[in-house]
Amino acid sequence: MALAAVLTLVAVAVGAVIQVSIGFGYAFVAVPTMALLYPEALPVTPLLLALPMTALMTAREWRSIDVTGFFLITAARAVGTAAGVALLVLVPVSFLSILIGLLITAVALLSFFSPNFEVTNKTRIAGGMASGITSTTAAIGGPPLALIYQDRSGAELRSTLSVSFVVGTVMSLAALAFAGKVQGWHFLLALQLLPGLLVGLWSSRWVIRYLDESWLRPAVLMFAAVAGLTVAFLGPQG
């Protein structure tokens, strides 16, 4: 158990560094690790940890937020969140690890191939709905929105996604609590892992200068895809 805690702390710290470096990546490292070591923690604990991180990122670049996009994404995400909760309630527990693993793999592959999307109201709504579903079921809500905003400036992408994550994460947690999926130990585990998140955010200012996005992004996505398949086919099934 002690080894599992250390590995998860490291995964959260590394994920935070990558998130600051390339605008996403925390969930692709932290969620597969938790899915293997603490499967019952998903999706609540990684969502709890993502909340302070995305709030800090929003505060840093709030002037670059796409306000219209934020409201459209948030409205659509409410629908996606409801659909995600319905999946968690209706899908048998024995298939949840398969569902989460395949979702992780799917969004990783989609991000890797990065098809070009024109930023329109329709794509914002579609991205918001997809983000609500994947965030509520697997705690990975970034890729659908990152795909939509991939051709915008880094500041607009990071700030718009961050503020959408803050509101969307609160929505997901509220919906999960209403469905009886949130328990006290989820908060205790998040508190235990919070130092890893803080270390990652603090050290990112020095670490990111040595990271090369040309290999880091594909490496993170490859790790997420492999880990997702591992969770789906070798992870806990009961």
Image (cartoon, grey):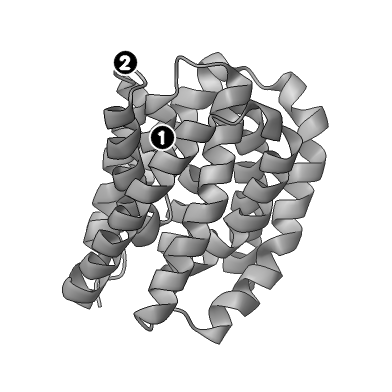
Residue at 40% of width from left, 73% of height from top? 176
Residue 145's tag is 1
Examine the rendering and report whether any part of residue 43 can be seen.
no
The one of 111 and 215 positioned closer to us in this rendering: 111
Q: Are marks 1 and 2 in contact (CB under 8 Å)?
A: no
Above-or-below relation of 62 to 177: above
Residue 116's tag is 2
Quarter of the rendering containing residue 82: bottom left
Judged left or right of residue 109, residue 193 is right
Above-or-below relation of 117 to 82: above
Above-or-below relation of 24 to 209: below
Residue type indicated by callout 2: Asn
Q: Position of residue 141 (x, y in %)?
A: 42, 46
| Mark earlier in primary sequence (1, 2) | 2
Q: Position of residue 152 (x, y in %)?
A: 50, 16
Above-or-below relation of 82 to 116: below
Which class describes the residues within 10 Å of circle 1: few (<14), some (14-19), or many (20+)?
many
Which class describes the residues within 10 Å of circle 2: few (<14), some (14-19), or many (20+)?
few
Residue type indicated by callout 1: Leu
Judged left or right of residue 173, residue 113 is left
Examine the rendering and report whether any part of residue 66 can be seen.
yes
